Amino acid sequence: MSELAVTGIGVIAPTGIGLDAFWKAAEQGNCVLDRVDRLAGTGYPVRVAGEVRGFDPAEALEGRIIVQTDLFTQFALAAADLALTDAGLDPSTLDPFEVGVVTASYSGGVEFGQREIQALWRDGPDHVGPYQSIAWFYAASTGQISIRRGLKGPCGVLVTDEAGGLDAIAHAGRAIRRGARAMLVGGTEAPLSSPFALACQFGTGLLSASDDPYTAYLPFTDAAAGYVPAEGGALFVLEDRRAAEARGGEVWGVVAGHGTTFSGLNRFDPGGEGLVAAIRAALAEAGCAPEEVDVVFADAVGTRAADDAEAAAIRAVLGANVPVTAPKTGYGRGYAASAALDVAAALASLEHGVVPPTPNVTATRVDLDVVTHLARRVEPRSALVLARGLGGSNSALLLRRASG
């Protein structure tokens, strides 16, 4: 069986547009968390967030598409363009039935939906736009990408909170193994774009209420008090490795194994058993021994209970000495987008032989080798990305370096 190759990466992140800007910030341990601009003065207890700055939909997309879409879909469309350019792949040169799209989102089109519902209550049903029926929906990004690019292959959407960003990649991988030529896959979110969106998030009791960007999100520490929400995301081009190399495509890395479990509604896996099972499944599919995992990109919820459960799961399978990092503490935890951004960071880590640090975290309370302060050169051959969802999903994705 041929390997699943990632040949293109497109990133829209609080730390920058494009992989180069995103990776530079991650490698340097930059923190771009800041006071929430978009909803300033609304009185919400969420003070700090990871907002994408410098993204202008009008510069990336056609006007007719902008009026039909929410920001989370605009992120996805722009990231898809970046990924295809990076891969050197023009879908119009391929059989459209052999190219598909799988995206993940947990928030959907909340800004678009709130705006139209406000119009409904204020002015009546005649003032609700025709795109309300699709723009708020979780599958909107998959649909808009496939329509814009003329793609008629396998398509789908995952809604499993942060785990969806990894599960979507595994889902797309199965499509490749069933004969798809290429897949666009990833996750994007825009959960900071409306008061309704923030109200839904704060109701979980997991968001940090701190107003200090440098202490608001400190997973694995005594000061952990929740996570900071973020927006953005990443999309990837996934291909059969032999086919990609035959067309002259460059390979960022290989998707070697995936595991997913479900451990109960409305809570993170309390003892870590579900995450343990997901990690073991990913390693088994990859044929990877625990000692062969060179770095872990942690889920890093930022509460003591969730962090302790994740630390226990990592120790149970991999031991306490594997380097663990959470670059998202510098730009926020963006649900399905966060897992996709972790995959982008992990692939860049494998390519450059560097493990990025965990911004703002200096001392931890867990028995793990958390990479802090500065990036660490370890020449990783494999990277394990972890993600969990509040709905009970646990996911693990094992990536391997393209060569060596």
Image (cartoon, rainbow, N blue to C red):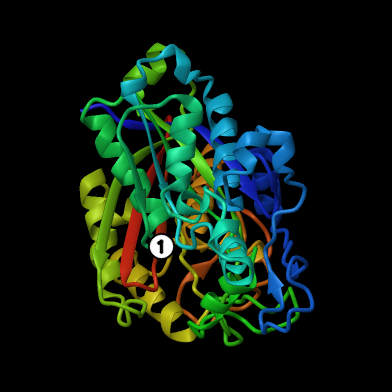
Element at badge 1?
Answer: strand
Percent x, y for residue 247?
A: 42, 12
Identify the residue under disc 1.
387
Percent x, y for residue 9?
A: 54, 36
In the rendered image of this protein, does residue 284 appear above or below residue 162?
A: above
Percent x, y for residue 393?
A: 31, 66
Q: Position of 28 compared to 93: left or right? A: right
For label 1, count other residues whose C-alpha is less than 10 Å away and answer few (under 14), some (14-19) or many (20+): many
Instruction: Tell me the quarter of the picture where residue 21 sits.
Output: top right
In the rendered image of this protein, does residue 358 appear above or below residue 14?
A: below
Quarter of the image for the N terminus: give it: top left
Q: Is residue 137 visible?
A: yes
Q: Position of 149 compared to 60: left or right? A: left
Residue at 63 percent of width and 46 percent of height: 12
- Give the residue type at disc 1: Ala
Residue at 57 percent of width and 75 percent of height: 227
Numbered circles on residues, count:
1
Percent x, y for residue 149?
A: 48, 26
Q: Position of 154 compared to 76: left or right? A: left
Q: Position of 93 compared to 356: left or right? A: left
Instruction: Tell me the quarter of the picture where residue 254 sits.
Output: top left
124, 301: nearer the viewer: 124
In the rendered image of this protein, does residue 136 appear above or below residue 150?
A: below
309, 166: nearer the viewer: 166
